């Protein structure tokens, strides 16, 4: 499935393509169609699953469809409430990225900084406002922000919001919103207090969730190598020589990268095949059946090409490159350790990959076992 299948409009699709996002993550697949139809959503998803785009894309689509922007008397049509300044900034970046061809205007407000620039941005007019609770209430109190024309309300990380003591703020903000609106509610967990708010706020919500990742991940031994780009290929050769009787799936970020790895390995007499979107369907099919029959022991694949691979006794997954979304890590390593067998996953992490590594560890709730230390 691609974003095109989700009936996303051309301007948003174009922006997604520019970011090289072709395939929606599972929370996106589930939440986007429901939200675009105008239904309330109760989304259970952690950071790293692509949940930001799961609400940002519908917000952009809905505002374009239902609320033509009135340039002369601007007022806010969508409010995204999130607990921290970091999240607020990230969400605003997502709107800037995905919404760049929509003509919709957005801004972000949070506390701890001078209000003047934020006020100026608001006065220029915005359709989408991303806010943390304290600064939002402050601006509402001063009459700088008005919520009476909100069509869509997104509450992000509701559980964290409560953990951080924002319950009273939220209780004050909710009654200021129009009764008739669409609400998208996201939380990683659903403790009682969060459930109470969602019950009060949502009307016949569709519940969408991504499977908790811990069960898949627990069966797999996960190792981490801190390694810089130039040394990656030697490390891979080393590992493959050690694992000489296992079937191995190696993940490369790009098609070109996959080909390059395959060339080097074949030169070193390590038999392997690369599969990716530039290969013909026939070539991919052949590579897969060779892998299944045991003729080829090693496959180098991109994420998209690897989808067709369903091998029972895949012993090892190697993340030569880290994925773009933390959730993809779980899908990748989930291909090993099936049917009660032990799986192994090796992950290469360069300096630039540290943030993604953190996201992955946050998502899976456990640290990978370090084999080598950072330089
Ligand atoms: P989030 O869970 O919203 O914090 O997203 C995690 C990361 O995945 C962010 O860096 C996003 O930009 C990225 N991302 C979200 N959706 C996709 C997608 N469909 N394909 C590739 N990357 C994505």
Image (cartoon, grey):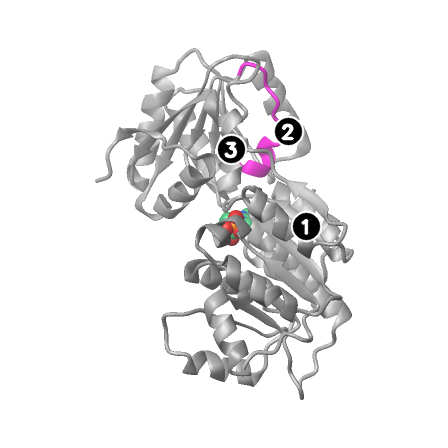
Image quadrant of residue 225? top left
Q: In this view, does 8 lie to the left or right of 299?
A: right
Disc on the earlier residue, 2 or 1: 1
For the residue carrying disc 3, how many other residues have a C-alpha within 10 Å: few (<14), some (14-19), or many (20+)? Answer: some
| Residue 23 seen in the figure | no
Q: Where is residue 199 in the image (x, y as percent from the top left)?
A: 68, 50
Name above or below for residue 298 compared with residue 301: above
Q: Name the residue under label 2.
A: 308
For the residue carrying disc 1, how many other residues have a C-alpha within 10 Å: few (<14), some (14-19), or many (20+)? Answer: few
Label placed on residue 330:
3
Q: Is residue 355 left or right of residue 324?
A: left
Task: Let me know if residue 311 is in the magenta part.
Answer: yes
Disc on the earlier residue, 3 or 1: 1
Tell me the CA gap for discs 2 and 1: 40 Å
In front: mark 3 or mark 2?
A: 3
Q: Which sits in the foreground, 352 or 248?
A: 352
For the residue carrying disc 2, how many other residues have a C-alpha within 10 Å: few (<14), some (14-19), or many (20+)? Answer: few
Q: Where is residue 208 in the image (x, y as percent from the top left)?
A: 67, 43
Quarter the C terminus occupies: top left
The total of numbered circles placed on residues is 3
Disc on the earlier residue, 3 or 2: 2
Task: Let me know if residue 144 is in the magenta part.
Answer: no
Q: What element carries label 1?
A: helix
Q: Name the residue under label 1.
A: 199
Q: Which residue is drawn at 51% across and 67% down?
A: 131
Q: Where is residue 277 in the image (x, y as percent from the top left)?
A: 60, 39
In front: mark 2 or mark 1?
A: 1
Instruction: Give the magenta part as a residue range.
Output: 301-313
Tell me the CA gap for discs 3 and 1: 31 Å
């Amino acid at each position: 499935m691609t974003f095109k299948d989700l009936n996303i409009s051309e301007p948003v699709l174009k922006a997604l393509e520019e970011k090289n996002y072709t395939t929606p993550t599972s929370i996106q697949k589930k939440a986007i169609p429901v939200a675009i139809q105008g239904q309330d959503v109760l989304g259970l998803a952690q950071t790293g699953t692509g949940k930001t785009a799961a609400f940002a894309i519908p917000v952009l689509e809905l505002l374009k469809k239902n609320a033509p922007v009135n340039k002369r008397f601007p007022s806010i049509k969508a409010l995204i409430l999130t607990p921290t300044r970091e999240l607020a900034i990230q969400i605003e970046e997502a709107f800037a990225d995905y919404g760049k061809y929509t003509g919709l205007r957005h801004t972000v407000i949070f506390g701890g900084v001078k209000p003047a620039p934020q006020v100026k941005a608001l006065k220029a007019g915005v359709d989408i406002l991303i806010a943390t609770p304290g600064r939002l209430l402050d601006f509402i109190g001063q009459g700088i922000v008005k919520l009476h024309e909100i069509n869509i309300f997104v509450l992000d990380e509701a559980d964290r919001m409560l953990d951080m003591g924002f319950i009273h703020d939220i209780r004050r903000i909710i009654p200021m919103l129009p009764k008739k609106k669409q609400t998208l509610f996201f939380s990683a967990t659903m403790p009682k207090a969060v459930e109470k708010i969602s019950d009060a706020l949502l009307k016949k919500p569709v519940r969408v969730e991504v499977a908790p990742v811990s069960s898949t991940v627990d069966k797999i031994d996960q190792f981490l190598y801190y390694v810089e780009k130039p040394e990656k290929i030697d490390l891979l050769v080393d590992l493959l020589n050690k694992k000489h009787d296992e079937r191995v799936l190696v993940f490369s970020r790009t098609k070109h990268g996959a080909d390059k790895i395959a060339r080097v390995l074949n030169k070193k007499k390590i038999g392997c095949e690369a599969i990716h979107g530039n290969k013909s369907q026939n070539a991919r099919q052949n590579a897969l059946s060779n892998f299944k029959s045991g003729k080829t022991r090693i496959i180098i694949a991109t994420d998209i090409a690897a989808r067709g691979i369903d091998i029972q006794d895949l012993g090892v997954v190697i993340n030569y490159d880290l994925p773009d979304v933390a959730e993809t890590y779980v899908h990748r390593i989930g291909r090993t350790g099936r049917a009660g067998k032990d799986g192994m996953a090796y992950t290469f992490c360069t300096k630039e990959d540290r943030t993604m590594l953190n996201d992955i560890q946050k998502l899976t709730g456990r640290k990978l076992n370090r084999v080598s230390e950072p330089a």
